[in-house]
Image (cartoon, rainbow, N blue to C red):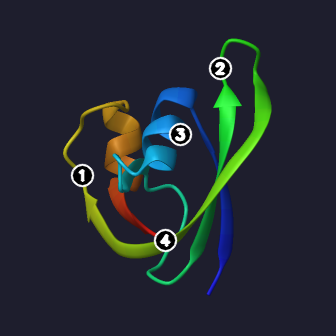
Amino acid sequence: MATIRKKIWPESFNLILSGQKTYDLRLADWRVNPGDTIILQEWEPQTNSYTGREVVKKVGYVGKTKDPIYWSKEEVDKYGFQVISLLD
């Protein structure tokens, strides 16, 4: 099992911290597996810096797809998507 650190913007961070959001959608340009631990580090895009807040989650189901939504067609064609279910 791996421990993975990823940036997350404040809006999504707060939703995950509150328990309202129990998944994360990411570009599948990195490897993640069920049972891994993910540390989401709040990132402030306006100041380009971490806030110091983190939330630690266990990865449940990892689903992947290649339907374009947020990323360029080239990125999606190369990597696809992954939807990460987040568990305590």
Which residue matches tag 2?
45
Tell me the amino acid under the disc marked 1: Lys
Tell me the amino acid under the disc marked 3: Phe
Structural crowding at the residue carrying mark 1, measured as other residues with C-alpha within 10 Å and reported as few (<14), some (14–19) or many (≥20): some
User: Residue at point 33% right, 31% down?
Assistant: 70
Give me the disc on residue 13. 3
How far across and down, in percent of the image, does residue 54 sit?
69, 49
User: Residue at point 36% right, 55% down?
Assistant: 23
Tell me the amino acid under the disc marked 2: Pro
Which residue matches tag 4?
88
Tell me the distance, in whole angstroms, between the alpha carbons under discs 3 and 2: 13 Å
Given this view, does label 2 or label 1 mark the residue nearer the observer?
A: 2
The numbered mark, 2 or 1, whose residue comes first in the sequence reads: 2
Say which element carries label 4. Answer: loop
How far across and down, in percent of the image, does residue 74 sit?
37, 37
Compare residues 17 and 65 and report the one nearer the observer.
Answer: 17
Asked whether the beta carbons under mark 2 and mark 1 sit within 8 Å of each other, the answer is no
Given this view, does label 3 or label 2 mark the residue nearer the observer?
A: 3
**Image quadrant in which you'd find residue 9:** top right
